Amino acid sequence: MLCKKGCDILHKLVINGGKRISGEIKLQGAKNSALPIMAATVLADGQTVIKNCPELTDIYAASRILTHLGCKVSRCENGTIIVSNSGIEKDSISEKLMREMRSSIIFLGALLGRCGSCSLYFPGGCQLGPRPVDIHISALRKMGIVISEEHGKINCTAPNGIKGAKIMLEFPSVGATENIILAAVKAEGETEIKNAAREPEIHDLVSYLVKCGAKIECTSGSTIKICGVDRLYGCEHQVIPDRIAAATYLAAAAITDGAVCISGISSLDVSSFTGYFEQMGCSVCTCNDSIYLKARNRILPIKSLKTMPYPGFATDLQSIMMSVLCMADGTSVFEENIFESRYKHVDALNMMGADIKVYGKIAVVEGVKKLYGANVEATDLRGGAAMTISALAAEGTSEITCINHIDRGYEKIDSVLASLGADIKRKPETR
Ligand code: EPZ
């Protein structure tokens, strides 16, 4: 994984478990909003000011792509990123830049919308099983875009221009919805996306584009209508708070019998995840722009957690909730319906003393009274976060390596948890 400057640095987290997580933190901005908004700046002439942009390795990767395309990107101390776009110089992205993260695929729609053509490679990112882009490609083809694939490279042209189209998604893919919106905002005519993804991060992207001058209407729950315009202009936009990071820090308090107050959630729909903590027996209260959670001494199990597209139970929360339910007073059952290989964290949790059995899409978690520190390797972003949470409650010391995965999505997770009372240190990984 690459740092700010694009060089390899390996770190590990060393956690002495058993400390209660309590205190107050301010929430980071949402990675999954900030990244598509950064890609969308390709379409907007002039300057875009993105506030509340988290400091993450994926954000640095997006900055490198924008710089490569001819934009000037600067970051201020207060989490604001300024992108100056006085004309895109290239419509291609190298394999190296594309492979740094999954979200690089969103530059497909952005470049098409800006240049009417592009050539780029299949993206990198967390290995959660097959992550095809067939839904993106078949939708873009409906818009008059000619797409060929060879040796991992995607070449796109639109000989007769990009045309609005009626598109019915077979699955509400987040990335495909974003790519179609970006390709459609400056296309000729109207595009209608049915069965579009409804995640709050999609609405944040739409809200940024509308401020830039785009004509987009999110009608009934899952239909989005886009009417192409000639030009978009940069604007100022504040990224929404990160709902998955919020749930992660609540989980840290829940598993350590702690209490945490998270501020900065004013535009966050917390109802999509607070119910699960209440089912575990925690007290949860939201007021003004804060959410407060107080743990229950022994966690209650949850009989059934099935991951579904938004507003269902988020796949990104599956590992996080599992790490807490490892210590519940009874059996919890998970069903992972979004990604094929999203139980990679299970072996590590079992090494810490959890009792989890996986049967295909199903994971059965028998609660245990104690977890024990262990040396484990982060397998992916949310899997690594789950190991961190379990380590906070485990007896003894855990070392979590390959935390480059965690750094893709959590801004300074070690400092945040240390500020809440955790005994956690980031150390160079020696191999
Ligand atoms: C986004 O990934 C998020 N990433 C993921 O966040 C999140 O887990 C996922 O949505 C689901 O909510 C970003 O926003 C950067 P999808 P994305 O296209 O867009 C299948 C995190 O931890 N599919 O909605 O890649 C696909 O294989 C992460 O922050 C196709 O079959 O997700 C998967 O099974 C990781 N063909 C399902 O749909 C396609 O063309 C959902 O994928 C596209 C997707």
Image (tube, rainbow, N blue to C red):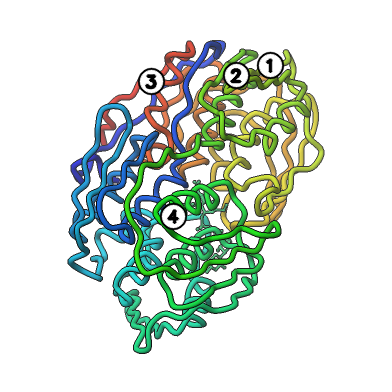
Image: 377 above or below 38: above
Q: Quadrant of residue 249?
A: top right
Which mark, residue 415?
A: 3
Answer with left or right where residue 135 lies relative to residue 170: left
Q: Earlier in the sequence, mark 1 or mark 4?
A: 4
Q: Is mark 4 within 8 Å of ligand 1?
A: no
Which amino acid type is shown beneath numbered disc 2? Ala
Separation of disc 2 and disc 1 at Cα? Answer: 6 Å
- At 64% across and 31% down in the image, what residue appears? 354
Q: Quadrant of residue 402?
A: top left
Element on which disc 4 rests:
helix
Name the residue beneath numbered marker 2: 253
Which amino acid type is shown beneath numbered disc 3? Ser
- At 40% across and 85% down in the image, what residue appears? 146
Element on which disc 2 rests:
helix
Q: Earlier in the sequence, mark 2 or mark 4?
A: 4
Q: Position of residue 296 (x, y in %)?
A: 73, 15
Depth-wise, is mark 4 or mark 3 nearer the camera? Answer: 4
User: Alpha-carbon neighbours of circle 4 within 10 Å: few (<14), some, or many (≥20)?
Assistant: many
Q: Earlier in the sequence, mark 2 or mark 1?
A: 2
Name the residue beneath numbered marker 1: 295
Which amino acid type is shown beneath numbered disc 4? Leu
Q: Earlier in the sequence, mark 4 or mark 3?
A: 4
Answer with left or right where residue 26 lies relative to residue 160: right
Which mark, residue 68?
A: none
Instruction: State the quadrant of the C terminus.
Output: top left
- At 43% across and 64% down in the image, what residue appears? 182
Name the residue beneath numbered marker 4: 209
Answer with left or right where residue 336 lies relative to residue 421: right
Q: Position of residue 64 (x, y in %)?
A: 23, 51
Separation of disc 2 and disc 4 at Cα? Answer: 36 Å
Separation of disc 4 and disc 3 at Cα? Answer: 33 Å
